[in-house]
Amino acid sequence: MHWALFAGCDVQGSARGGAQCFGANWLSAAGHVRWAGGELGARLMLSLEPLTVGARGYPLLLQTGESFEGEPLHDRQHPHDLFMEAALLYTARIGEEHLARFYAAPVGAPALGPVAYPHRASAASDPFAPLGHHWQDSTHISFGVLNAAVLSERATVDVSWFNGREPDERRFDFDLRPPDSFSARVTASPASSLSLQGSFGYLRSPEELEPEISVHRITASATYQGRFADEGALAVTALIGRNVPSQGPPSSAWLLEANLDADGRNTLFGRAELVEKIGHDLVLRPEQGEQVFPIGSLALGYLRRFPLTRWLEAGIGARGALNFVGAELGSYYGTRTPPGGMVFFLLRPAPPPAGAEQPHERHGAARTGR
C-alpha cells in the first residue's frame, strides 16, 4: 500500500485568480499471487478529492481541461475521480529473458506518456498538477483499458486499446464506454537510474463538450532518479507532449521538474513549463478561439520533513509560482506575470532508505521492466 495527503491553502493572484483551502490525496493498494505458472496481480487506487477539493477543482492559473456544469474549466485544476485505478494483471515468462504482461482495467492507465505526475519521484513534493497535464499524462485515468506488454531487463514495449473519453464531472461513478482509442509506448532503462519513454496515441472524442474532435498525442520523456550526497536523493524529469486535433491547431507542452532531497529532511523542488494553450480552452473571446497562446511558468518550493513514526512522516512546505503571458492574455489577467502560491501540510508513509525503489514509482518501474 502507498498513499499521500496534501492539505493547505492556495492563493492565485490576478483578475482570474482565487483562493481556496483544499486537500489533494490518493491511496493505492497492490498485491499478487503465483497462478498458472505466472503471477496474477490486482491494483486499486482511490482518491477523496471529489470531497476534499470539490467539484470545480482548485484555483490554478492558466490550467485547462475537463468541464463543470457544461462549461470548460479554466484557471482551475479538476479533482481526480474516486476510482483512479481498478485493475487485474497477469505476468508470465516467455523464454529466458522476457516477460509478457496483460492488463485489464475498468479504470486504469493505457500505454501513453510517462508515469503520471502524482506518482513521479520528481514531483513527489509538489501539490499542484502541471499546466501541460492534458498534453502529457492525462490518460492515467481512463475508464476501460486493455493492455499487452513485453518486458526485458532494460526495456518494455506495450500497446493499449482503451476508452479515450476524459472523465466527466460526476466523480464517484465509472464512465465506461466501448474502447475506441489506441496507443503504443517504448520504455528503456539504459542504466538503473535512468528511464526513457516515447509513446503515441489516438484519442477518439476525448472531450465531452467537443465530441466531434479526436486527438493524436505524442509524448517523450527522460527521468533520472539517484542518490544525492550521503542521505539524500535527486529525481529529475524532462517531458514533452504534443496534441494534434482533428480540428483546430496543434499545440505542445514542455516540462522540466526536479525534487532534491538534500539530507532526508530538507527538500527543494521546482518545475519549469512552456505550454501552448488554445483560446477556446482558456475561454477567451470567440474570435480568439483557434489562436495559440504560448505561456510560461516557473515554480519553486521547499518542504521540511520530519518523522512521526518508523512508518510515517509529515512535512510542512510552501510553493510559489510566477507565470508569464503575452499582452493579449495579460489583458484578461490584469498582468503579464500572474503569481500563485500555496502553504501546505504533507502526510505520507516514510520513504525507504536513499537509493532504494520509491513506493510511488512502482507502477513506473513495472513499465520499464526494472
Image: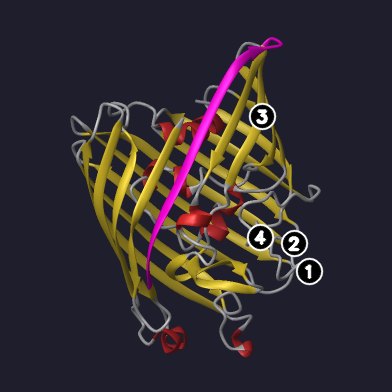
Q: Is residue 54 above or below residue 364?
A: below
58 in the magenta segment: no
> How many numbered discs?
4
Among numbered discs 1 and 2, the one appearing first in the sequence: 2
Mark 1 and 2 residues: CB-CB less than 8 Å, in contact? yes
Amino acid on which the number 2 mark rests in the picture? Ser
The colour scheme of the drawn protein is: secondary structure
Image: magenta residue range: 19-37
What whole-number distance in Å separates the C-alpha atoms at marks 1 and 2? 6 Å
Q: Residue furthest front?
A: 51
What whole-number distance in Å separates the C-alpha atoms at marks 2 and 3? 26 Å
1 or 3: mark nearer the eye = 3
Question: Disc 4 designates what residue?
Answer: 168
Given residues 183 and 359, the one toward you in this image is 359
Question: Disc 3 designates what residue?
Answer: 88
Q: Is residue 235 left or right of residue 144?
A: left
Mark 2: few/some/many CA within 10 Å (<14, 14-19, 20+) = many
What whole-number distance in Å separates the C-alpha atoms at marks 2 and 4? 13 Å
Q: Is residue 78 left or right of residue 225?
A: right
Image mark for residue 212: 1
Residue pictured at 63% horizontal, 62% vertical: 169
Amino acid on which the number 4 mark rests in the picture? Asp
Mark 1 and 4 residues: CB-CB less than 8 Å, in contact? no
Mark 2 and 3 residues: CB-CB less than 8 Å, in contact? no
Secondary element type, mark 2: loop
Q: Is residue 364 left or right of residue 203?
A: left
2 or 4: mark nearer the eye = 4
Residue 364, how many percent across, how many down? 51, 35
Question: Disc 2 designates what residue?
Answer: 205
Mark 4 and 3 residues: CB-CB less than 8 Å, in contact? no
